[in-house]
Amino acid sequence: MSGPRVTRSPLDPAVLLGEARRDGDGGLTLFVGVVRDNADGRAVEAMEYEAYEPMAEKEMERIEADLSGRFPAVRLVMRHRIGRLTVGEVAVVVAASGPHREEAFAACRAGIEEIKARVPVWKREWGPDGSVWVDPLQPRPNPGSC
Amino acid sequence: MRVEILLFASLRDELGGTCAVEAPESRPGETTVGALREAFLASCPSASRLGKRILVAVNEKFAREDDLVRPGDTVAFLPPVAGG
């Protein structure tokens, strides 16, 4: 696999899909997480991703190892970008290649769920009124509504 | 036992990139993640909003409350992760 799993460089989903693909596989699935322009009713201009980099890299490797146990027939390629990303930029990619669609979809879904649950990455949401760290358990209501 | 703790994201914004905590020793030269968490929360009350939700990593791996911390270990306190 080429390059670090946690990177400041832009991610190219097509390239990563190509890295996952094998001639013997018939199913390729791809999850691409991008920065969106809204969160809980607020306007979002950018997301600033931060990682505990050496641990995040290792945790991505551990997820791959765990999932290769659960989905032995699947090849997974996973990347997370960090730094300041604007709307539409790719933050995370999970590509899965398997003999058939069932394993490829399941492994791809498991990959993104494990990343969100385990990898030490945080994001600060930037909008017109400044910035705030995103707490996954505490979505804040739109200040203008009640 | 004095332990230097790495901090990230909102915890780093509030308290700086590192924070030294004096934790009670369970045996000479060792303490537990749980004891370290209690000592940290006592010395940094602003972190208590996260309390038990703070994740603790020892040597770049998630640790449980009864895991041991010894001199030379790399300890990090992490806010709930929010990647993706």
Image: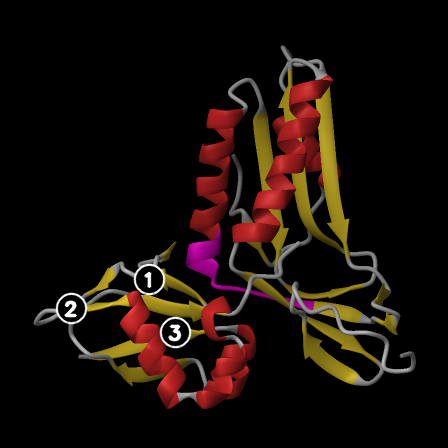
Among the 4 quarters of the image, the one containing residue A55? bottom left
Residue B9 appears at what percent x and percent y? 55, 74
Toward the top, the furthest residue is: A24
Q: Which of marks 3 and 1 is nearer the N terminus?
A: 3
| Mark 1 touches mark 2? (CB < 8 Å) | no
Q: Nearer the viewer, residue A36 or B3?
A: B3
Residue B30 image label: 2
Is label 3 or label 1 in front? 1
Residue B54 shown in magenta: no
| Residue with the mark numbered 1 | B65
Q: Which of marks 3 and 2 is nearer the N terminus?
A: 3
Q: In this view, does A63 lie above or below A139?
A: above
Chain for numbered disc 1: B
Residue B6 image label: 3
| Callout 3 crowding tier (Cα within 10 Å): few <14, some 14–19, many ≥20 | many
Q: Which of B7 and A23 is in front in this view?
A: B7
Residue A137 appears at what percent x and percent y? 65, 64
Residue A49 shown in magenta: yes
- Say if residue A21 shows up in the picture: no
Q: Nearer the viewer, residue A18 or B45?
A: B45
Chain for numbered disc 3: B
Q: What's the residue type where badge 2 is placed?
A: Glu
- Number of callouts: 3
Among the 4 quarters of the image, the one containing residue B26? bottom left
Is label 1 or label 2 in front? 1
Q: Give the range drawn in magenta.
A: A48-56
Give the secondary structure at mark 2: loop
What is the CA distance from the residue labelled 1 to the residue labelled 2? 13 Å
Please state if B12 lies on the left or on the right of B2 as rendered. Answer: right
Question: What's the residue at 74%, 44% (across, down)?
Answer: A32
What is the CA distance from the residue labelled 3 to the residue labelled 2? 18 Å
- Say if residue B81 shows up in the picture: yes
